[in-house]
Amino acid sequence: MSALAMNISTKWAQIFGLSTLTLAISACQTVPMSDANPVVARPNIPLLPGQNYELYGNNQVPSSLAAVRWQSFYTDPKLKALIQLGLDYNKDVKQTVLAIQRAQAQYRITDASDAPNVVLNGQYSYGATNIRDRNPNDSFNVGLGLAAYELDFWGKVSSLKDQALQNYLSTTAARDTAQVSLIANIARSYVDLSYQQKQLELAISTLKTREESLRITKARLDAGIDSKAPSLQAAASVETARIAALNAQSGVLKARNALKFLVGAPISDDMLPAPAVSSIASNQVLSAGLPSDLLRYRPDILQAEYNLKAAGANIEVARAAYYPSISLTGNLGYSSSDLSDLFKSNASSWSFGPSIRLPLFDAGQRDANYEVAQIERDQAVARYESAVETAFREVNDVLADRATLDQRTQAQYRLQENYQGLFDISDARFKAQVDDYLAVLDAQRSLFSTQQSILNLEQERLNNQIALYQALGGGANLGPVIVPTSKYYNLVNVLEAKSNKQIAAQAIEASTGPIILTPEQAYAIEANQPVNVVKQKELTPVDINNDNNTDAYISVVENSPNTAGSNASGSNVAGFKVIKTKEEVKVVKP
């Protein structure tokens, strides 16, 4: 064996020994165990497993309403044109698109951390080895350098990539959430503008009728037929109708402003709706679908799922911090004390070797970071459960309104017929001089109020269709989710390059949310999880007020895993318990 080979063998033996020593030291530390238990999410859903939403209408289509694209759900051509303008120009949607682009770039940054970072470096220095040296030297260096490249033995880099991927998917779901909301708001504003215009027409028509009534009562007052009371009542009715017309006119202007703001572009007069549009949506698809459809189509639920998976990846990042960080550094170039000799063959130099870093004492910082990651995961679970509960509540509320809406509308139409008949009779009796004009005025007011209520109910009927479509997640992008895949592999995993099928399967798995467990499954999982046994050390008396009296006893508490298994973290967590002697407060678990 040559001297060079022996030297290299000796160097690698030293490196191996250093690595072994570092790993031995790290083994003496308490490293949390990887939690393989599934995430338990138990939202309080007011529906039994397998129960369907109530279907309404004559055509009961089994698929969910949310599976219909908005271009097919909405049938009014003017409304469809306004929605498309809104998707093209609305500022909120633009922000979500930019957020997706930013998340894509962030994922590429994280993915690039698996690729070696080679830099061209050059350096010049002038100095001496000590302060008394009167012959300082020049030093020239130029070459290619390999920056500290981390070998991902413990999955830190891959977990960061998983986290970046889930954050990207979360932004795509946020964009769908904004789109669903925008489509629904444009449709509501469109309907509102339409019925504000009809309210204005009704108010103007009523105002003209009441002005004619006022003319008649004044004529009868001047002729001495009636007293002044009918004339005053008629004048009050005129002013009431005028106020209603002015309010409706203001409502038309505000509804048009709201629609213009949502669209984000100028709206021509030919794009405005006709007064009191009777239909804006298809009547062929009337099913709310299965409750489980909400978990597929509601983008806010999908966003909560992706955030939950990102929080799980963050736990693995915090866990990997307990292991040593192994990096590779290297340099290939030239080094010389004379610039003219820099690129000669005898000035060439190279270096290559790993570096290992493991903090031995951090005052519990890694423990705290790991605990923070676990808490953030629990917060993500709670937010996910809240999103599911909110979705089911919104759908049930819309269906509850729908259940009585038709009956209320029919009753209002019957009420209108009654008041119309009452007005006709009162007007005939007045003309026959059997009754005075007050009965006619009362019938006019009741009829006008009923006509306004009918318009409100017809508007509510259309808004209910919009709200149901929105609550089910209708309006989101139904195309496949574009999932970015890794372009680079860490040197540790370079031999595990995946085929296109494996990459596709991994992308599908990444874009799929966590499994929703039934209450029975959740209880079964929690029943099998180990119970922490609390061990309490000797109590230490503490005098807080320095009055020579014991104010409290403090003891260090350790939560250790039971012999039935290991807990999620596998580590002992220290805490404090305080027992107040004066108030005799019981010991509580911190």
Image (cartoon, helix red, strand yellow):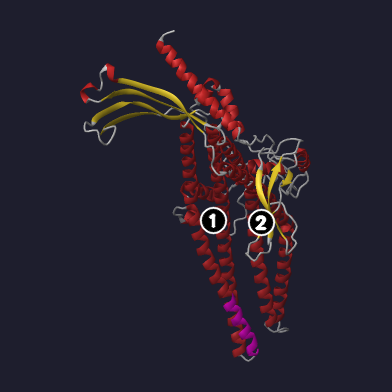
Q: Position of residue 263 (x, y in %)?
A: 49, 52
**Which residue lies at the image location 70% right of the left edge and 80% below the top edge?**
439
Q: Nearer the viewer, residue 161 or 476?
A: 161
362 in relation to 457, above or below: above
Q: Which residue lies at the image location 65% right of the left edge and 90% below the top edge?
A: 227
The image quadrant of residue 122 is top left
Q: Dot 1 corresponds to which residue?
A: 273
Lower position in the chain sequence, tag 1 or tag 2: 1
> Which is nearer the eye, 460 or 581?
581
Is 186 magenta? The answer is no
Residue 320 visible here = yes
Mark 1: amino acid: Pro
Camera-side mark, 1 or 2: 2
Q: Position of residue 223 (x, y in %)?
A: 61, 90
Where does residue 121 sit, x and y in percent of width and height?
32, 30
The one of 100 and 323 positioned closer to us in this rendering: 323
| Tag 2 residue | 461
Label 1 to label 2: alpha-carbon separation = 17 Å
- Name the residue type under label 2: Arg
Assess whether residue 238 is covered by the magenta stretch: yes
Q: Quadrant of the N terminus?
A: top left
Q: Is residue 289 visible?
A: no
Tell me the crowding category of disc 1: few under 14, some 14 to 19, or many 20 or more residues within 10 angstroms, Cα based.
some
Q: Which contiguous range is marked in magenta?
A: 226-240
Label 1 residue SS: loop
**Secondary element at tag 2:** helix
Left or right side of 586 for 108? left
Q: Answer above or below: position of 588 versus 244.
A: above
